[in-house]
Amino acid sequence: MRLILASASPRRRDLLGQIGVVPDAVDPADIDETPLKAELPNAYAMRVAAEKGALVALRHPGALVLSGDTVVAAGRRILPKTESADEARQCLALLSGRRHRVWSAITLIDGDGRARHRLSGNIVAFKRLDRVEIDAYIATDEWRGKAGGYAVQGRAAGLIRAIQGSHSAIMGLPLYETRALLKAAGYPLD
């Protein structure tokens, strides 16, 4: 049973390795990830994960295809995968001293084309960040390409007051849900 990971994220590959899974191939999906008008963050994460999986499944008939998407949301607002220091600084200033949600959606498409979906909702609370802390974090470059401008597995961990939910989901792949979907599809795990 071939497993294709529809993601270029090295974090997702590493996380899969934690549950003993090594994908047979990595084939990232290149889709438009622009949120739809008035789309809620959890629905957005589910839609993007499903679209990535569907596209890659077309290229690998008969294989299992695992895709995912992780969204950082402040209320109904979907925060970007930050590409500039100013964008990351704005995200961190917005998240400073408050709780926000991290939605991590996964889709597993089996060899017959059936799609199964799971969503992990998590809460992260940052301490109140002063300008010096934000500037120091920006200097690390860990924020580059990260949803909401931070990586929970890096130095930002020292700025997070509390987490409710799945640490792996906040990193980008909810391992409990991923393992359950793989087992249900007959993928050999144990």
Image (cartoon, helix red, strand yellow):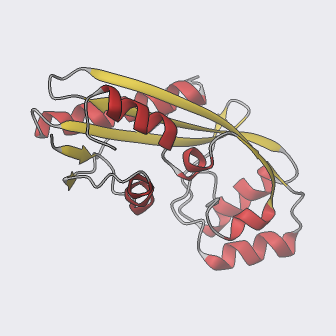
Give coordinates of residue 149: x percent, y percent.
63, 58
Residue 32 visible in this rendered orientation of the protein: no
Give coordinates of residue 90: x percent, y percent.
73, 57
The quadrant of the rendering that contains the N terminus is top left
Give coordinates of residue 151: x percent, y percent.
61, 61
Give coordinates of residue 62: x percent, y percent.
10, 32
Is 67 on the left-hand or right-hand side of 35?
A: left
Which of the 4 image quadrants contains residue 31?
top left
Residue 88 visible in this rendered orientation of the protein: yes
Is 129 on the left-hand or right-hand side of 48?
A: right
Is 133 on the left-hand or right-hand side of 52?
A: right
Number of disc labels: 0
The quadrant of the rendering that contains the C terminus is top left
Residue, far front: 190
Depicted 75 relative to depicted 43: above or below: below
Which of the 4 image quadrants contains residue 75?
top right
Q: Nearer the viewer, residue 26 or 81?
A: 26
Which of the 4 image quadrants contains residue 74?
top right
Depicted 182 relative to depicted 143: above or below: above
Which residue is at a point 41% across and 40% down the rendered structure image? 68
Q: Nearer the viewer, residue 54 or 135?
A: 54
Which residue is at a point 37% across and 57% down the rendered structure image? 13
Is 113 on the left-hand or right-hand side of 125?
A: left
Q: Nearer the viewer, residue 188 or 4?
A: 188
Which residue is at a point 35% across and 23% down the rendered structure image? 116
